[in-house]
Image: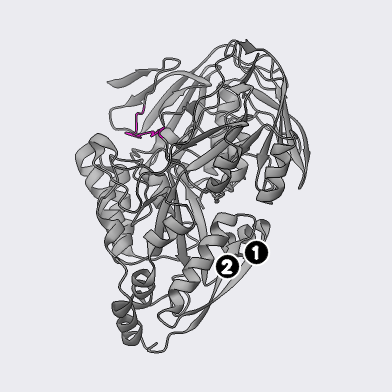
Amino acid sequence: MRKNRRLRHGMGILTMALLILFTAACGNNNAAAPTGSPEGGTNRGGDGVANTSSPPAPEIKTEQSAGAKVQGGDVVVIILQDLDFLDPHLAVAAGTNEVLFNVFEGLLKPNEEGELNPAIAESYEVSDDGLIYTFKLRSGVKFHNGNPVTAEDVAYSYSRLAGLDTGKPLQSAFEDVQSVEAKDASTIEIQLKQNSSSFLTALTSAVIPKGYEDSNKNPIGTGPFKYKEYLPGQRLVVEKFPDYYVKDVPSLDKVEFRIITDAEAGLLALKSGEVDVFPRIGTERLEEIANDYTTLSAPQNLVQLVAFNNAKKPFNDIKVRQALNFAINKDEIIQGVALGYGTKIGSNLSPLLAKYYQEGLEDQYATDLEKAKALLAEAGYPNGFETTLSVPSNYQFHVDTAQVVAAQLEQIGVKVKIEPVEWAVWLERIYKGRDYELTIIGLDGKLDPYQILNKYISDASNNFFNYNNPEFDTVLSSAVTEVDDAKRVELYKKAQQILAEDAAAIYIMDPNSNVALNKKLAGYKQYPLYVQDLSSVYFTE
């Protein structure tokens, strides 16, 4: 017997207990990160998760225009970094995926509540053993080249992601795929090697035309906008796809994602009217522009951390990692850098995933300079040591955090040299090459805890921490295959505890994401994911 799930437009099929808090809290966040790789508020009601780090923040205006909807129009959106790939199967930077979200879709698609909605799929069944997924495709879905989407296209796309021909999966979420087969023109069957509770979220990955090999130059998707132009270092332009299967979506005719890596230059462009949307604008700028622009703020399911290269001395010593954790004052960073708009964390999961979040870890390394010095002495560094902290220079939020971290570590004799690096260099040398000692980054969240925590698996290709703990590997592997929901939750909490006990990194905060909008725009949605969704945005009279 199979379990049948009918997908209904506008209703979630995988509610992840994400508590989206559209309150007055806001944060100075310009953070982003690779996806294998970019909140605030007081007590969050029924989930019992509290911001133990900061007092309530001044109220920020969050109303969008209530004027009559106007069809059409062009919008310019600031993005803080260049794209790493146009091919959605190769992209690893969250800043790339936030843009490509408008061009590509998978069988399923997340909404702003963190639920999975139908996209290319219409319905699906899962076998009782959890190994076979059978999807029926929605009729009338077209690629941007005008061709209809068939099961052959889905089979090609997901086989490519799973590396069935090469033996090397392009995305870790597809590592458990055994086979992908088009049963007929509208039916796709995916067989897994083992049961995976997180697999549905993988099916938000992009479907591209069968055999298409030019995605990195002229990408073709099924989303509400189609690719028009890309000028490296300058802009990506998309335009309305008139044959999109959702009626009257999108409203806008064209969207330009303009690459402005300097926050001050971005602010000037906003004030001059050159741009209409400034995502991730600094908190300190919100009040400055509040009278002339609509400002929004919400939690974003992101983890800002100081990463250790766990394979490099002295950070291969747990006592050193714990010492540095005890030296850091997270409250001071949240107040000084995020202006109080951040939720203190203690492991690599945001409180937005309330169901899986392990409370209490945020204070496991409460600031204790004497304990930090004692641990350093035990590790053989009674006078501290020198190290380099590499920071992506285009994210001022991380640069500012680095300054505070360096000052705090100096109190225990650790002399930190801050090395600003360009984003492309960070991705290539630090993230891919693992050539660093310390770095600060924000890791964007997913809808499933496994897809967040699996970067710490010992042999994971995206384990840029060089973290290695067999117990962690076992716990996480058990969690993703566990059928019993309560047991699965406890295993994910145990995995977080292991990361905290090992001091795998210094986990700082989940900062709010802020957006400034042209007052004539409405319909902007904030997600618990690192995306910019322009499909719902429209001009008003």
Which amino acid lies under the numbered mark 1 shown in the image of this protein? Val
Q: Which residue is mark 2?
A: 390
**Residue 478 horizontal/vertical position (percent):** 28, 49
Examine the rendered structure and indicate whether residue 329 appears above or below residue 226. below
For the record, the magenta segment spans 14-23
**Residue 470 horizontal/vertical position (percent):** 32, 63
Magenta region, main secondary structure: loop
Examine the rendered structure and indicate whether residue 361 appears above or below residue 160. below
Examine the rendered structure and indicate whether residue 310 appears above or below residue 539. below
- Using the image as rendered, state which of residue 494 and residue 138 is in the foreground: 494
Name the residue at 44% across, 80% down: 314
Q: Is residue 459 left or right of residue 490?
A: right
Q: Is residue 459 visible?
A: no
What colour-coding does the image apply?
Answer: one colour
Q: Is residue 374 visible?
A: yes
**Residue 164 horizontal/vertical position (percent):** 54, 42
Residue 421's label in the rendered image is 1
